[in-house]
Image: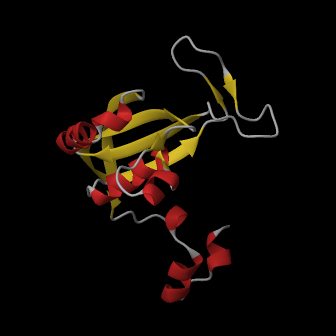
Amino acid sequence: MESHSVSSGMLRIHVRARDYVHHEGKWWRKVLRRDLSHQLVRWAHDAGLEAAVAYRSHLGFQGHGPIIDDLAGEVRNPQTIIIVEIVGDEHRLRAFIDRHRAMLVRAHIQFVEIQNWSLHHVHSAHYATRNDHEKKGIDHDATKQ
């Protein structure tokens, strides 16, 4: 198996479910606020970064604060931690943070060096699919034995 690795970085940004982006200008923009976690993913996409994902934690705490359990009640807890992970080149990630610094003052931000792996030319029966076998005229069920 050949692998090719490229060094990259990942931002892990912890925000609260209650954190919103407040728009300036027209009154309707102020009323129609957007979750900060959703906006971070959109900004990362607009900035051309490699990937971004936001997910909601079910149980956790930050610093020395209380443990927040999002599943403890019938209504979602606005204190729940939302984790936004953004992948890209370190310089572009730093520029991203600098550009949106005002919105991230209360966020907990981590930078982790990562490696992106791409697998090329993997020729193994374990990875062959039914379609691959059908194209080659191979009985897929016979290869499982």
Q: In this view, does 77 lie to the left or right of 115?
A: right
2 or 22, nearer to the observer: 22
12 or 18, nearer to the observer: 18
Q: Residue furthest front?
A: 27
Identify the residue shown where x is 43% and y is 45%.
21
- The quarter holding residue 82 reads top right
112 w.r.t. 116: above or below: above
135 w.r.t. 48: above or below: below
119 or 116, nearer to the observer: 116
126 w.r.t. 106: above or below: below
Q: Is residue 44 left or right of residue 95?
A: right
Q: Quadrant of the C terminus?
A: bottom right
- The quarter holding residue 110 reads top left
Q: Residue furthest top?
A: 64
Residue 25 placement (x, y as % from top left): 35, 54
Residue 144 placement (x, y as % from top left): 65, 68
Identify the residue shown where x is 39% and y is 50%.
23
